[in-house]
Image (spheres, helix red, strand yellow):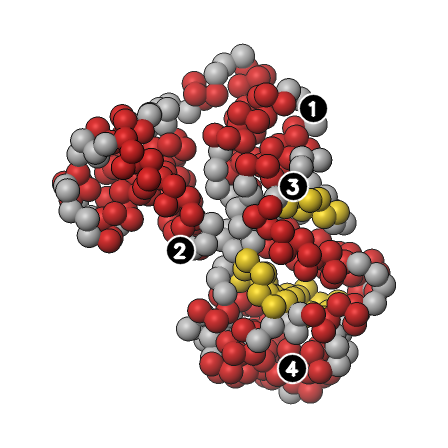
């Protein structure tokens, strides 16, 4: 295990691979960037009595961009709790499923039975809170369900792309209720965590130098890391360079795609303007160019209106910090990467 990296063992489930998971790994790998999450999850998984952990959460909300591992952890915790407590004690639902079951129970005249079933749970897990329908009835029912479980020291775990306190689409009382619990932000894996994930996933197929080099080159969420590993494996099997498997993307094309995505012209991206929206779009170009091309900072700066390489380096560091905190930026870059790699 790499120094500063923790491994949280989770019960695995064959084929449980989602966009927000660490596929193929029966564990969650956390570097220093996710130290707080390790403390919370280990407390949740330790011991035989969830009631001992529940008072620390009231409830626990895991937040983070796509690919940060929220669903991987939530599913692992659900399986662990099923094994420990039995099927009837744990309920795992998406926010959309919660709303559907609630409406079905109301329409069928079984609302009291639905509420009683949930109130008797030892653990309730609700995923993708940002997808909860905006209906007041649904949102207040979730709030009341959480209150009922918390009052009897049951465990409630939710996942969302951002902090509930900032989710204006949530009804105020639900938002306040969630904000009163423990919110833990999951960040994309740092270099140490990426190295450990690759070591475990590659099953000794590559040496440490190869994997460390791949970890340094591949920033971003875990699915992106696994795609890079798959390319390395394919290159090894075919005897080709990884750069040969995917044609290089011209910087001009990359700039054009980003400009179109942000509804800007290419000319303004090349211009000296420091308007906030332009600075952000340029930073996205820089991040994508560093990830998807072999261009140096100086070459990227030349292609963006003749900017100095130190300016490009500074912008790259800023977008990396923003990526760790802002799910909207993370989603934009993931969408742009899919567009560019599909061209």
Q: Nearer the viewer, mark 2 or mark 3?
A: 3
Q: Which residue is mark 1?
A: 204
Query: Could you tell which of marks 2 and 3 lies nearer the N-terminus?
Result: 3
Q: Please tell me in which quadrant of the rendered image residue 15 appears.
A: top right
Q: Which residue is mark 2?
A: 328
Q: Residue at x 66, y 41 (%)?
A: 5
Q: Nearer the viewer, mark 3 or mark 1?
A: 3
In the visual, does 237 lie left or right of 314? right
Q: Are marks 2 and 1 in contact (CB under 8 Å)?
A: no
Query: Could you tell which of marks 2 and 1 lies nearer the N-terminus?
Result: 1
Q: Which residue is mark 3?
A: 4
Q: Which residue is mark 4?
A: 147
Q: Does the image show residue 128? A: no
Graded by Cα atoms within 10 Å as few (under 14), some (14 to 19) or many (20 or more), the crowding at tag 4 reads some
In the visual, does 251 lie left or right of 153? left
Question: The residue tagged with tag 2: helix, strand or loop?
Answer: helix
């Amino acid at each position: 295990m790499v120094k500063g990296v923790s491994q949280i063992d989770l019960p695995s489930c064959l084929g449980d691979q989602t966009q927000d998971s660490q596929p193929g790994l029966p564990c969650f790998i956390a570097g220093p960037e996710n130290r707080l999450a390790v403390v919370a999850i280990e407390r949740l998984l330790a011991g035989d009595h969830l009631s001992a952990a529940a008072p620390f959460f009231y409830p626990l909300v895991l937040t983070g961009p796509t690919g940060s591992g929220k669903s991987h952890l939530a599913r692992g915790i659900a399986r662990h709790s099923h094994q420990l407590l039995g099927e009837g004690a744990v309920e795992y639902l998406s926010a959309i499923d919660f709303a559907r079951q609630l409406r079905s129970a109301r329409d069928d005249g079984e609302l009291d039975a639905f509420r009683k079933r949930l109130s008797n749970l030892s653990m309730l897990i609700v995923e993708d809170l940002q997808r909860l329908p905006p209906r007041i009835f649904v949102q207040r029912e979730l709030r009341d369900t959480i209150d009922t479980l918390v009052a009897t020291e049951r465990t409630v775990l939710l996942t969302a792309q951002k902090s509930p306190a900032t989710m204006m689409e949530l009804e105020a009382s639900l938002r306040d209720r969630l904000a009163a619990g423990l919110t833990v932000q999951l960040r994309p894996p740092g270099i140490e965590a990426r190295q450990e994930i690759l070591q475990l996933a590659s099953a000794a197929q590559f040496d440490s130098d190869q994997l460390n080099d791949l970890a340094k080159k591949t920033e971003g969420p875990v699915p992106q890391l696994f795609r890079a590993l798959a390319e390395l494996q394919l290159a090894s099997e075919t005897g080709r360079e990884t750069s040969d498997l995917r044609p290089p993307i011209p910087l001009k094309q990359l700039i054009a795609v980003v400009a179109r995505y942000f509804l800007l012209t290419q000319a303004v991206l090349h211009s000296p303007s420091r308007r906030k929206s332009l600075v952000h779009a340029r930073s996205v170009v820089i991040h994508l160019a560093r990830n998807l091309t072999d261009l140096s900072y100086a070459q990227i700066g030349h292609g963006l209106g003749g900017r100095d390489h130190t300016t490009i380096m500074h912008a790259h560091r800023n977008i990396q910090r923003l990526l760790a905190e802002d799910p909207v930026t993370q989603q934009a870059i993931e969408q742009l990467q899919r567009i560019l790699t599909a061209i």
